[in-house]
Amino acid sequence: MIKTTELTKVFRTEEIETSALNKVDLHIQKGEFVAIMGPSGCGKSTLLNIIGLLDNPSGGQYHFDGEEVGNLKERNRTLLRKGNVGFVFQSFNLIDELNVYENVELPLIYLKLKARERKEMVEKVLERMKIAHRKKHFPQQLSGGQQQRVAIARAVVANPKLILADEPTGNLDSKNGLEVMNLLTELNREGTTIVMVTHSLHDSEFAHRVVNLFDGQIITEEVKKQMGEVLL
Amino acid sequence: MFRSYLKTTFRNLMRNKFYSAINVVGLAIGIMACVLILLYVLSELSYDKFHEREDRIYRVNLFAVLSDDNINQPVTNPPLAAAMQGEIPEVEEAVRISNFEQPVIRHNNDVFNETKWFFADPGFFKVFSASFIYGSPENALTQPNTVVLTETTANRYFGNINPVGKYLTWENDRDFLVTGVIEDYPENSHIKPDFLASFKGSALDKNMEWINNMVYTYFLLEDGYTKDDVDAKLEGLVTKYVGPAVKQAMGVSFEEMLAQGLKYRWYAQPLSEIHFDREVSSGPEPLGNRNYMFIFSIIAVFILLIACINYMNMSTARSSNRAKEVGIKKSLGSNRNSLIAQFLSESIIITFIALILALVFVKLFLPVFNNLIEKQLLLHYFDNFKTIPLLVAFGIAIGIIAGSYPAFFLASFNPVKVMKGVHKSEGSHGKLRSALVIFQLIVSIGLFSGTFVISKQLNFIQNKELGFNKENLVVINKADYLGNRISSFKNELLAQSGIVQITNTSSIPGRILTSSTFYHQTANDSRGMNYLYTDDDFLKTYQVELKEGRFFEEGNQSNVRSVVLNESAIKRLNIEDPIGKKVYEGKKTDETAFTIIGVVKDFHCESLHQEMSALVLFNGRGQNLTVRISGDIQQNMKTIENTWDKFANGQKLDYVFFDEDFGRLYKAEVQTRKIVSIFSALAILIACLGLLALAAFVAEQRTKEIGIRKVNGATISEVLYSLNKDFIKWVAIAFVIAVPGAWYLMNNWLENFAYKTTLSWWIFALAGVLALGIALLTVSWQSWRAATRNPVEALRYE
Ligand SMILES: Nc1ncnc2c1ncn2[C@@H]1O[C@H](COP(=O)(O)OP(=O)(O)O)[C@@H](O)[C@H]1O
Ligand SMILES: [Mg+2]
C-alpha cells in the first residue's frame, strides 16, 4: 500500500539546510501495523507527514496504493487524502471553538456528506470510542485521555484505509495510553493500516513491525509478529 | 512617569511595525480628512466675520408678491441708500454697491475682461473693513472716476510698484485714477471685488427710479438699535417713494394694488445671514448651503471614528500580547488606574504622532483639495494663536476616544489568569469588534451610495434633453457694443466656413432672465413670466422646435408687435388656439398688446432644479450673440475673433462656450460630488487598513485551527471561505443597515431638483458589491497566505 524509494526531504530556511530524510526505502502492506522509532529530530514526523500526503518529498518516489504521488499538487493531495487517511497527534489537535461532536464531524463535512449521514457516522464512532456522553463538551473540558479518544474518533470517522499516529500516547498517562493502544489495535484488526511514531518500547510491542530511524535513514527493521497472527 | 510611558509606547510601536503603521497611517488619514473638511466648513461658517463692524452691517432686501410671483432679492434701487441715510437716524451709513458691469480694462498693452468690477459709494470703507496697502480709506472713493484695486489686481496691471496716481482705461472711454490698493478679500467674503470704483460719476449714481432695482444697498446700524427699528422705518419709505412711482408707471394707485394682494417690503438682513439664506436669491457670490455643511461635518466625524475604531479593534484584538505585561505590572502592585493612565497616554502619544503626520498630509493635499472645490482655503499653523492649542486639544480628544475602551479593557485583566495563560481574547469584545467593523462598513456603503446617486443625478441632468442643442455653441458677451454693425458682423461671420448660424438675444438659457407680468386678452389677472429678446435666427441657432404658427421673419413689419410663446407659457396663460390671440405685457393697454404668431416646444432656460419655465419671446436685440459652429473649435474661434476684431474698434472679444456656461448651474452639485467621492474613498481606505490588520490578526490567531482543518481534508478554497465568512457577513449586515438610511437621505437630496433621476436598486447593490469586493480583496490578501500555508508548519510548533 505504501512504497517509498530513496525518499529524501530537505528543509531550507534562510540560513540552513536540514536534511530530514535521507534515501528512505519503506514498504508497508495493507493491513500492517508499523511503528516508527528513533531519537528526537531524526525525521519521524517528516516521514509520517509525507506518507500522509501532508507534504511532498524533495526527492525519491512515493507510491500510494500503486500510484506515484510524490509530485502531486496540494489540491490533488488533499483530494486523495480525504477519507483515505486519518491523523492522530500527540497534542490531539482538536479545534477549541468546536465541541466534541463538531470536531469529529469535520472530515465528513469536507467529504461533503449529507447532514443525516454525518450524524449517523459521528454518533456511531462516538459510541464506539465511549465518548458519546461528552459530545456537547468542548475540548478544554475533557481530560487528556478523552481528548485523544475524540481525536481518534475524528481520524476514523470516515473509515480511512490508513491511520497515521504521531506519538499518540506521548501526552497521556499509562492507563489512558493503554486504552489508546488498544483502540488502535482493534482498528488494525478490522483491516485499517496503521503507521505510528512512538518513543515507547511498550507501545511498539503492539505493532507487527518496528522501523528504526536515525538521522533520516532507516537503520534497522524488526518484525515483532506476523500479520496473520494478529488477524486471527 | 510620562517618560516611561513614552518609552513603552515606542517599544510597542517598534515591536509590531505592521500594526503600528496601520494604526498611525489610518489615524493620520482620518485626521487629515477631518481637518480638510473642517477647514472648508469653518470657512463657510465664518463668512463675512472678518469685518470689524460685522454685527452692525445689514443689507436691504426686497420682498414682494407681484401677481402670482414671489420675489425675495438682494437688489434694490439706486436712491434708497441716500434716503435711508437722510431719513432714518438709526442708519449710521448707507452705501450702494453694484457689480453689473463687466468692463474691459486696459493699461498700456494689458487688456483684460473684468468680471469683478464693483462700484461703491464713498462710505464703503466706513461700513466694510479693508486693509489699505497704499492710499487711505477716508478719501479713496470720494472723487468720480477713482478706483481702489486689490493687491492681486494691482500686481496684474502694474507689477510690484505703488500704482496710486496711475490710470486704468475703462471700456476705451473713461480713465480711472487709482487711489488705493487693499489686501485681497478673503475666501469667505460674500463680496470679492477686484476693483472698487467710486459710484460718483457712474451711470446709476444720479438715477432716481424707485422701482428700478439694480444695486445692492448695505448699511451700518447705529450702536444700540436693532434691525426692527430700521425695518419699521423702511416701510414708511416704501409708501413715501415707491407708491407714487408705481402709480406713475402702472396708472393704478399703490393702495389699490395692495388691496389686490400686492406686497412690497424692504427689510434688513444681517450680514452674518447672507451667505446661507437660500430664501433670498444670491448676490455677487454663490450662496452656501448649510445642509451640505452639516453633512460634510458628519462625514468628517465618521471618518475620524472609522480611524479610531481601527485603533480600538487593533489594541483589543492584540491584547493577549499585552496581557502578560499587565499581569506582571499588576502583580508588582500597579493598580487599575495607573494602568488605565498608561494605556491612555499611549493612545494619546500615538494620536499625536498621527496628528503630526496628518498636518504634513494636509499641507501636501490642501492645494489639490482647493483645486477640487475651487476655493482658496488656507491653513496657517502659527498665524493664529488659537490654532496650536486647538490642535493639541483635538489630539488629546481623539486619543481619549480611541484609547479609553482598550485602556479599560486591558487594565481589567485578571493577573492570575493572565499569568497562567488562561486569558482568552475572544468573547464579548469580539462581538463589539464586529459591531465596530460593521459601523465602518455602514459608513462606507452609505458614502458609496451617496456618491453614486449624486453622479447618477448629475449625469441625468447633464444629458437630459433640454429642448435645444447645447453643443457647439459659442456665446459672445457684450455684443451690443457693435451697435448697428451687428448685422453686418453677423453676415460677414456667417459667410465663413465652420459658422453655421448666429442669433442675437438679450440673454441666454441658464443665465438670469428678465421677467414681467403678462395678461391674456380674456383674463383680468396677470401671470409673472420670463421673457427674452431674440432676432429671427434664434430657433435655427439653438435648434428649438416650432410647434405651431411661425417664428419672427426677416423684414416682417409686424414682428415688433408679435410674440412667440413656449408651451408652458400657453398653459400658464390658459390660452386655447393661441395663434392670433393677444397678450399684454405689464398692463392691459393698446401700447402693451402683442399678437401671438407662434408657439415653440418647451425648452429649459433655467437649471433643472426648477420646473420648466414659461417663456415669452419678443423680437429684438440684446447683448449676446450665440454662434453655432461645426468642425474644429480652434479654427472656428480664430475665425470669430478675426471677424470680431474687424468690427469692434479694438474692443476685446468676450466669449464663453455655451455648455460650460450652462454647466455652472450645477457647480454646487459637481463640487459636492467631488467632496463626497473623495471622502468616501478615504473612508473605505481607512476602513480597509483596519480590515487588513484585523484579517492578519485573525489569520494569525487561527493558524492552528486552519492547520487542523486542512489535515482533515479542507481545501484551500474551503479554508478561504471559512476565513472570509465573517467579513462577508459583516458587509451583508452593514449593507442591510446602510441602505434604508442612504435611500432616505438621497431621496431627500433629490428633492432639490424638479427633474430627478430614479433611485434605482442597482445603485445600492453596486455600493454593496463594491464594499464587499474591496473588503474581500483586502481580507483575502491575508487569508490567502494563511490558507495556502502548509498545515505541517502550522501544527509543528506546539
Ligand atoms: N518545516 C520545517 N522547516 C525546517 N526544518 C524542519 C521542518 N520540519 C522539520 N524540520 C527539521 O527536520 C528534522 C526532522 O524533524 P522531525 O521530522 O520533526 O523530527 P522528529 O519527528 O523525528 O522529532 C529536524 O531537524 C527538524 O528541525
Ligand atoms: Mg516528531
Image (tube, coloured by chain):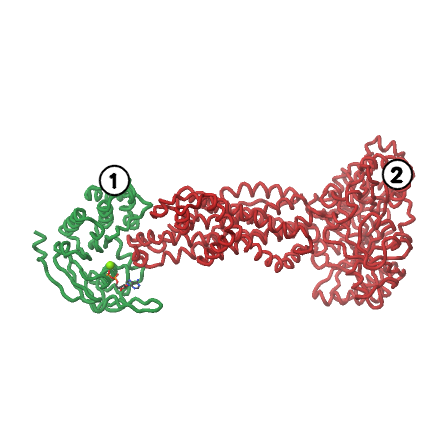
Which amino acid type is shown beneath numbered disc 1?
Arg
For label 2, being within 8 Å of ligand 1 is answered: no
Q: Is residue B627 above or below residue B594?
A: below
A211 displayed left or right of B490: left
Camera-side residue of B162 and B60: B162
For the point 34% across and 69% down, which residue is it? A15
Which amino acid type is shown beneath numbered disc 2?
Pro
Mark 1 touches mark 2? (CB < 8 Å): no
For the point 13% across and 64% down, which residue is it? A221
Which residue is label 1 attached to?
Answer: A134
**Observer able to see residue B182:** yes
Residue B735 is situated, as x and y percent measured from the top left of the image, at: 49, 45
Query: Hue of chain B?
Result: red
Tell me the SS state at disc 1.
Answer: helix
Residue A132 is situated, as x and y percent measured from the top left of the image, at: 23, 40
Question: Which of the image's four quarters has the C terminus of chain B?
Answer: bottom left
Shown in green, the chain is A
Label 1 crowd bin: few (<14), some (14–19), many (20+), radius 10 Å: some
**Observer able to see residue B685:** no
Tell me the SS state at disc 2.
Answer: loop
Mark 1, mark 2: which one is toward the viewer?
2
Label 2 crowd bin: few (<14), some (14–19), many (20+), radius 10 Å: some
Residue B89 - label:
2
Q: CA distance from mark 1 to mark 2?
A: 96 Å
The subunit letter for the residue under badge 1 reads A
